[in-house]
Image: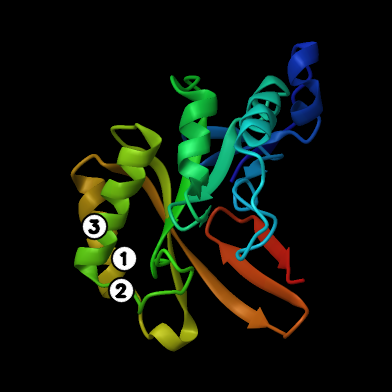
Amino acid sequence: MTTTNDSDTSAAEASAAVAGHYRIGGELTVRRMGFGAMRLPAAQWDGPAHDPVRSVAVLRRAAELGVNHIDTAAFYFFEDIAANDLIRTALHPYPDDLVIATKVGPGRLPDGSWTDPAGPAELRAAVHRNLRELGRDHLDLVYLRFLRTDGPGEDRFATLAALRDEGLVRHLGPVRRIRSHPGGPRVFVLVSGVWRVEMQG
């Protein structure tokens, strides 16, 4: 991972540029200050819902400020409001330098409950769902989401590698929950080297 500071950016980009940037896979250059889309549909998994018009405006403002790395997932939704749909509404056609990272693995049902660990068929379907919802012919970065209790992930990762070979995915990485405390932080490790910490409650 290569990190640099940007000094020759426009005023509109300055807010995101001051954090510098890094490279994913040696070819995708993204601002170190990215945008996580999990809370676009709602304040929490079980609501209340956010105003979709405001969420679209927030996405567009983030892009104006130079953010070119968005983290999303098809399971980021609340009722009929989905993060992927909001991203497509706000930013499609996408800027050439925009990198969208998404996650696949256990899915969420309409009632918000989680499915069992995803097998090869479910992972393939999840990638195609993200492509369809985002309106893209490939995904820049796909994380395989799994927990320690899911067991080894080699076979699932092989499925995603096959999709990469088909040109539907450019880069792959694991995201794994390694620590959880009720009412406390949940820590995930991403292959890009970014630590992501989400607070419950």
Q: Is 21 rendered above or below residue 48?
A: above
Q: Residue 157 carries which label?
A: 1
Q: How far apart are marks 2 and 3 (CA)?
A: 15 Å
Q: Disc 3 or 1, which lies upstream in sequence?
A: 3
Local SS, label 1: helix
Local SS, label 2: helix
In this view of the protein, can residue 156 be seen by the observer?
Answer: yes
Q: Local crowd at mark 1 within 10 Å, few (<14), some, or many (≥20)? A: some
| Residue 147 in the figure: left or right of residue 166 | right
Residue type at mark 1 is Phe
Residue in the foreground of this view, choosing between 118 and 159: 118
Residue under circle 3?
124
Q: Where is residue 99 shown, x and y percent of the image?
A: 50, 35
Q: Distance between the residues labelled 3 and 1?
A: 11 Å
Q: Where is residue 105 shown, x and y percent of the image?
A: 38, 66
Q: Where is residue 191 shown, x and y percent of the image?
A: 52, 59
Residue type at mark 2 is Glu
Q: Local crowd at mark 2 within 10 Å, few (<14), some, or many (≥20)? A: few
Q: Disc 2 or 3, which lies upstream in sequence?
A: 3
| Residue 19 in the figure: left or right of residue 88 | right
Q: Quadrant of the C terminus?
A: bottom right
